[in-house]
Image: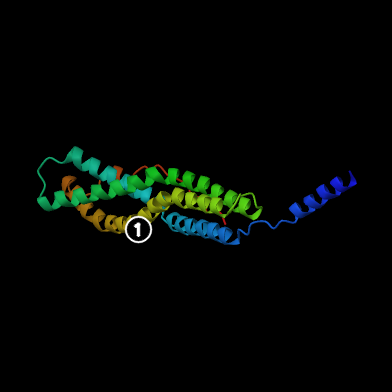
Amino acid sequence: MTRIIGFIFAALILFSCKPKTDFSAEITQADSVKKEIQRVVTGFNQLDSVRISVSENTIGAYLGYITQNLKDTISREDAFLLSGFKGIKKSFGKYSKTKRDLGRFYAFNLKQIESLQTDLKEGMIDNKDSAKKYITSEIDANRELMRMMRLHTEIIPNEITRYDSLKPKVEEIIKKINKGTLPAELLNVPVKRETQEVEDDD
């Protein structure tokens, strides 16, 4: 009986001394994924959402006024100008509609990556193959999120530049309709402000 107890005790000691799987490489990789997402989010958050909202609503008000008050036909050049102005509004609208959802996706995905990092550090993952599978899953889950954020980050600044360039020209069209002046209702366009930002945790 004593021998059996001793054997069990020795087996327990041997088992407890069994080295855990070294996940240091996987931890580094998971951290790299997290940092890449945070870099993309930082760029996305640098977009001026208030200015975008103001510009989007201004375009809508200008185009609405022209549609309601234009009596004569316009030139092909002016029609092309207004079409471009409307296209800018469409880009701003896509940004405004997706901003909140992208923020939610980021917050959820960030927690998932941090949970994976914790599991790796505490040896909660079965083996390296499983760890690789989980990391790949996180990369796949964030690929579309990062693509959308990068797309807005690349497109919106160019659209703001176009807006600044076309706005005075559209105002000239409005002045022609309104006897040389800009209507008072277009001087202070009401704006729905979107204050929520995508949180960028350290």
- Near-viewer residue (101 or 51): 101
Q: Residue at x 27, y 50 (%)?
A: 88
Quarter containing the C terminus: bottom right
In this orientation, does residue 85 appear? yes
Q: Residue at x 21, y 55 (%)?
A: 169
Q: Position of residue 122 (x, y in %)?
A: 66, 52
Judging depth in this view, the residue of 30 and 56 nearest the camera is 30
Residue 189, percent from left and from top: 34, 44
Residue beneath label 1, please?
A: 154
Is residue 175 visible in the rendered image? The answer is no
Quarter of the rendering occupied by the N terminus: top right
Q: How many marks?
A: 1
- Residue 24, percent from left and from top: 60, 61
Between 88 and 23, which is closer to the camera in this rendering? 23
Element at badge 1? Answer: helix
Residue found at x 42% / y 49%: 145
